[in-house]
Amino acid sequence: MGIPGLEHLHIWISIPFCSAYTLARLGSCTLLFIIQADTALHKPMYLFLAVLAAIDPVVSSTTLPKMLAVFWFRHREINFYACLVQMFFLHSFSVVESAVLLATAFDRYVAICKPLHYTTVLTGPLITKIGMAVVTRAVTRMTPLPFLLRRFHCCRGPVIAHCCCEHMAVVRLACGDTRFNSIYGIAVAMFIVVLDLLFVVLSYVFILRAVLQLASQEARYKACGTCVSHIGAILAFYTPVVISSVMHRVARRAAPHVHILLANFYLLFPPVVNPIIYGVKTKQIRERVLGLFLRKDV
């Protein structure tokens, strides 16, 4: 249905949505090109950043093309199995992104708390294992969702009051006892978000303690500077999740379009701001981005 209650504004709403989607893809492609082209950036921190830059547009690409088709052409139909596939990839890549942010927190922890062991701890094989664990966790947690829904009939109508096939929006259409689906979906989301965020916070507690033990103020600023971009990415990812979750519980009587716009904000905000955060706050990337557009006089 797109955004119920705001159908007359779909064309206008599509402008910032399309612009944000374009900017996200442009920023992510720029980061990937810079990291791939410069061998000096082939380090764990930048490899995790490259993965994040690759995932961000994929998350938004699972929903934005269909969403824009609804806004522009009123093409609201979607095959049931295509809907389940969209739901699977939307939630799976969100789980992957959360895990990559956790892996980057671990990278910063080792770099600041155990700098002498950084190259021996974060080796190529370990990074490969982390990548495999991230993908495995996302696939195993999210694979049951479409199969659990596939066994139900949509007797409450074929209309999803949302811009995309979000899990709970599809569950509401199903007949029968869907309590297990609802509980499983909420439990997985809370388990992943809370656990990942807990370990991220724990990493930064150790990082802060290590920074405060540094002798010189300059060394403290330098250590904190390496974490600023990652903290910005964490806030960009988790803040919309927390706001949307709180709104669902505090403002239950709010108009449906409020919750849908918040859900879309979560899909678009991190992919747009992450390249900006890393481009501005990471010195090595900032210098190479400027080098692409500015010709140095010799």
Image (cartoon, rainbow, N blue to C red):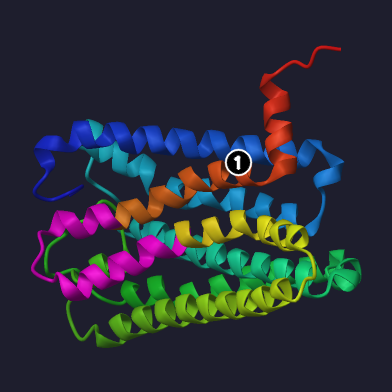
**Percent coordinates x, y for residue 73 in the rendering:** 23, 32
> Which of 181/192 is in front?
192
Residue 8 versus residue 174 in the image, above or below: above
Quadrant of the frame with the C terminus: top right
Q: Specify whether 247 is left or right of 285.
A: left
Residue lying furthest front: 216
Decide: is 48 above or below 179.
Answer: above
Where residue 71 sits in the image (x, y, percent)?
23, 37
Three-letter code for the amino acid on which mark 1 is drawn: Val
Element type at mark 1? helix
Q: Residue at x 52, y 50 (%)?
A: 56
Is 229 in the magenta?
no
Q: Report the residue that reaches farthest toward the top.
A: 297
Is 58 displayed left or right of 115 in the figure? left
Q: Is residue 290 visible?
A: yes
The image shows residue 15, relative to residue 220, as above or below, that is above
Q: Which residues are magenta?
A: 237-262
